[in-house]
Amino acid sequence: MKYLPLGATDVEVSAVAFGAMSLRPDSAESGKAAVGRAFELGITFFDTADVYSQGASETILGEALAEHGIARE
């Protein structure tokens, strides 16, 4: 995986992002598994917004990060 600096910071993120728009309550478990697999493949940049699934996407992403032991930066 290629990593790039995030703007003018010292933080590096994967060049490929995981778009979390499709994370929703009716498929939360498979979505959490997808987040874990993405991280295993080197993805460290997760895109989400409070309007995705009426805010549920952010909740599910947070749960997935915690369940997979993925540290937040």
Image (spheres, rainbow, N blue to C red):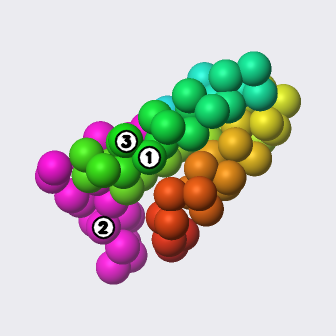
Amino acid carrying label 3: it is Arg
On residue 37, which mark appears? 3
Q: Quick check: 28 left or right of 47?
A: right
Q: Identify the residue under disc 2.
A: 12
Q: Position of residue 56 (x, y in %)?
A: 79, 36
Please tell me whether residue 32 belongs to the stretch shown in magenta. Answer: no
Q: Identify the residue under disc 1.
A: 36
Residue 28 visible? The answer is: yes
Of labels 1 and 2, the one closer to you: 1
Asked which secondary structure carries label 3, the reply is helix
The residue at 77%/27% (across/down) is 25
Q: Position of residue 67 (x, y in %)?
A: 59, 57
Amino acid carrying label 1: it is Gly
Residue 21 visible? The answer is: no
The answer for how far apart the CA atoms under marks 1 and 2 are is: 19 Å
Amino acid carrying label 2: it is Glu
Of labels 2 and 3, the one closer to you: 3
Disc with the residue nearer the chain's start (1 vs 2): 2
The answer for how far apart the CA atoms under marks 1 and 3 are is: 4 Å
> In front here: 68 or 49?
68
**Contact between labelled residues 3 and 1, with CB atoms less than 8 Å apart:** yes
The answer for how far apart the CA atoms under marks 2 and 3 are is: 19 Å
Q: Which residues are magenta?
A: 1-18
Mark 3, other Cα within 10 Å: few <14 / some 14–19 / many ≥20: few
Asked which secondary structure carries label 1, the reply is helix
Q: Quick check: 31 left or right of 10?
A: right
Q: Position of residue 16 (x, y in %)?
A: 29, 41
Mark 1, other Cα within 10 Å: few <14 / some 14–19 / many ≥20: some
The residue at 36%/73% (across/down) is 11
